[in-house]
Amino acid sequence: MATIAMGHAGAEAAYAGKRGLWSWITTVDHKRIGILYGVTAFLFFLLGGVEALLLRWQLGAPDKTFLSPEVYNQLFTMHGTTMIFLGVMPLSAMFFNYFIPLQIGARDVAFPRLNAYSYWVFLFGGLVLNASFLFNAAPDMGWFAYANLTSRQYSPGLNVDFWIIGLQILGIASLAAAVNFFVTIINLRAPGMKMMRMPMFVWMSLITQVLLLLAFPIITVALVLLMLDRNFGTHFFVPSGGGDPVLWQHLFWLFGHPEVYILILPAFGVVSEILPVFSRKPLFGYAAMVFSGCFIAFLGFGVWSHHMFSTGMGPMADTVFSLGTMLIAIPTGVKIFNWIGTVWGGSIQFKTPMYFALGFVAMFIIGGLSGVMHASPPADLQQTDSYFIVAHFHYVLFGGSIFALTAGAYYWFPKMTGRMLSEALGKVHFWLMFLGFNLTFAPMHILGLNGMPRRVYTYSADMGFGFWNAVETAGSLILGLSFLVFIVNILKTLRRGAVAPADPWHGATLEWSIPSPPQEWNFAVEPTVEGRDPLWELQRTRGALPEPTRVSGKGIHLPSPSYWPIVTAFGTALTLVGFLMHVTLGVIVAGVAITMLGIFAWAFEPADH
Amino acid sequence: MDAQAATHEHAHPKPILYLKVALILFVMTALEVLAFEVSHRPGAPMHDLVAPLLNEILIILSACKFALVAMFYMHLKQDSKIFAGLFIFPLIIATVIIGALLLLFAYLRMLHPTA
Amino acid sequence: MAHATAHAMHPPTATGLDTRKLAIWTFIGSECLFFATLISNYLVFKGKSLVGPLPHEASQCVLHGQMTTCEPIFEIPLVTFGTAVLLFSSFFVVLALNGAQHGNRKRLIGWLSATVVCGLFFIGMQVYEFRHFYHKGLGFTTNLFGSSFYTLTGFHGTHVTIGVIWLATLLVLAIRGKIPAEKSLNLELAALYWHFVDVVWIVIFPVVYLMR
């Protein structure tokens, strides 16, 4: 390995305030920011889970009055919004943050302070969104907020406004992070790490950043137009003023469809890391995996109206979007076959990460199959707005994203914390989750085709929906239990779990070549990469590698901590909150002032202090 | 950074080129406005030629201006193709989206003609 | 900002390109979608206003249920002049950057000042235009044309304003001698943003003001 020592002569690695709250508030270290994302996202995920359990309790039997329709609407809207924007996306961000720099052999991301800024904006956005509960005005119009239910006339309260402002704040976090990770992957790769040698997780993350960069501006505009309609008297989506509610659906789904690929591609990446390691075989068809990922992303911009087959676009439009949707199944299928090809003939290590990764493949296939069924407009006219759709997206988002992210959590936990999670508890977690998940969501296929509509707070006994709903509710309780097992596993392990070596799984990628957890600077010496699966490459020529030692870090220069990111993030959030209730000019002016102060101070902050 | 400064030096066009580009942009803008004025005056010379093609003429002229600013002022002609790719790919997606929305809403417009 | 000496010791990047320049282009790419959506919104609602004032069609102007002839609301000469000013401001910032790259402080300050002045003029023209339209009866909520017009050009104007602030800050730095040749990238980043803002106007001008 080449030994290019990185650093500025004479500068000590300065880690003043490594401990304590202030060190977390001012951190610009990608690993710490990753942990911040992970913990915050997991808490929001649990909140979204509680919301789901409440929904399931209400639906467990016919004609229940546990939740009023108004509360029910708030809970299902918040469940969806939370799981997507405050759950899956930031959980993925945890892995982007922690592992992209490690896997490409870098010391940090391209813009460490911008990275911190993104986290704080995300936190503030999540808090604003959930603050709506305090006003008894949680969003209640579905996570997709169709017009003109969202007009001031039909939604007079603050519910929609909280959703608009919350999502705008979150969008800024996503865009800033996307610029950061995109540039990091393109420009900060270690010598020898050509694009076609990058780990598949890095590839899928790169494609995800591109989707974020292209899709989020669209929802930003859509949210602005909706806010203008509600607070400033425009009529973009209001028919009485000449506007068109269907335009909202187009703009929303132009964002929304790429968004679902944003939710699944990182999961694809994680699974593409785990399956090879636990099959002791390289990923099958690396190039095909890269190109299919690119193709999925590109095509993903051409299929948005498959969410709108029932809006009367006409046969021409229906056909185009139907064909595009069916076409996307092809690169997706390529990936699935390549995952199977990876495992085929391998030496399977049945550890917890592998269980969840294999579970992902199986569950995602099911979700993908129901998805292809929706691609046919005549079939979809029966399926749309029924539980059949709910089944589909939970199979791909839970069976897909969550299973994969959980696999990633078990896989990477030792690296992040230096401790090994309990295999026994991990397997209990898996089986409970697998059982609970399928009990909860499989019957939804049946209920949907039998006519149970979505977004209903109850159903009457003579509909015949009672039995399967009861099964689903029982399943959801088992699912909840599985997460308790996970939390117990994590807490027990953090307290006194087995110490983890640098490379507990015999991994292929660079993160396994440094201590667990890594030292602040990641690599004492910048690695040089000679091929894909660099660690396996190295072990092929040199045999087993010794356990890496912890070094002093003298002479390694790292970006200094800073409080300007959190200040600027606060200013950003405050500015947008000023638009929450019509226009509160004072708040907006204060927000803009704080933001500008933060930006200027940040820009002129000395690099070393 | 040193390597970049070097490429910057020898690939650096002279300021006179930028002046030429500025003048061409000015002339093209004048042509756009001229096309507009001509198509709004039925008696004007070339009216019958220009009026039905006004939108097409404007699209072509503005596309040329766009390309000139991108290639010369934004330096894409001399710079790495990566920068051009970072600009062109989103532009393609943007154009497809604008086109698709126009198509979708033009159909609806045919069903419900407006004044 | 990093010290001048730090530049020479920055590790080489995987592409050989400057990381900040890569970032500004990435941001610009993303902004293309932002303006594309706003432009789509304008085009989708073009011709669909229920009441006037309308951009061009004078003879069909309807006010309060009575057919009346009224003038088209656009003042093409003024906007054309503003367009030309913005175009020339792009030229000026290129000259300013050229000055910075050659360490010519006078050229840098002179042309950068001209750029800022042009930017301010453009904003002034927009403000005047908005007020003029408002007096002629085109409010933000009067009709779809007003709503989509003010939203599109308003967001563009906001971007111009941010650009002016950015360039003005750099101008102050330049006057204080803080933009030597090694730091010319700082201006180049702002200049790229400024050109983008100009390029968006190159699209908005014909689409909004000239097209049928």
Image (cartoon, coloured by chain):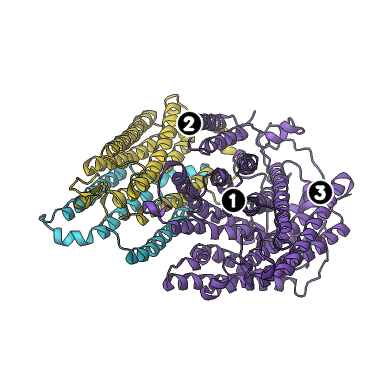
Find numbered disc 3 in the image and state the secondary structure of the residue it sits on: loop
- Residue C136's image quarter? top left
Chain in cyan, by letter, is: B
Q: Quadrant of the N terminus of chain C?
A: top right
Disc on the earlier residue, 2 or 3: 3
Residue A225 place in picture, x, y as percent: 45, 48
Q: Where does residue B83 sit, x and y in percent of width and height?
A: 47, 52
What label does residue A140 carry, if any? Answer: 1
| Amino acid type, residue under disc 3 in the picture | Pro
Image point (45%, 27%), residue name = C173
The crowd level at tag 2 (other Cα within 10 Å; few <14, some 14-19, many 20+) is few
- Using the image, tell me which numbered label, if any, was put on residue A548: 3
Left or right of A450, for residue B27: left
Q: Nearer the viewer, mark 2 or mark 3?
A: 2
Give whichever of discs 1 and 3 has the lower sequence position.
1
Q: How many marks are shown on the rendered structure?
A: 3
User: Could you say whether the residue bearing mark 1 is in a helix, strand or loop?
Assistant: loop
Reading the chain from its start, which is encountered first: label 1 or label 2? 1
Q: As shown in the figure, which amino acid type bears the numbered disc 1?
A: Asp
Q: Is residue A16 above or below residue B70?
A: above
According to the colouring, which chain is purple? A
Same subunit: marks 1 and 2: yes
* Residue holding disc 2: A585
Real-space Cα separation, disc 1 to disc 2, in angstroms:
27 Å
Hue of chain C? yellow
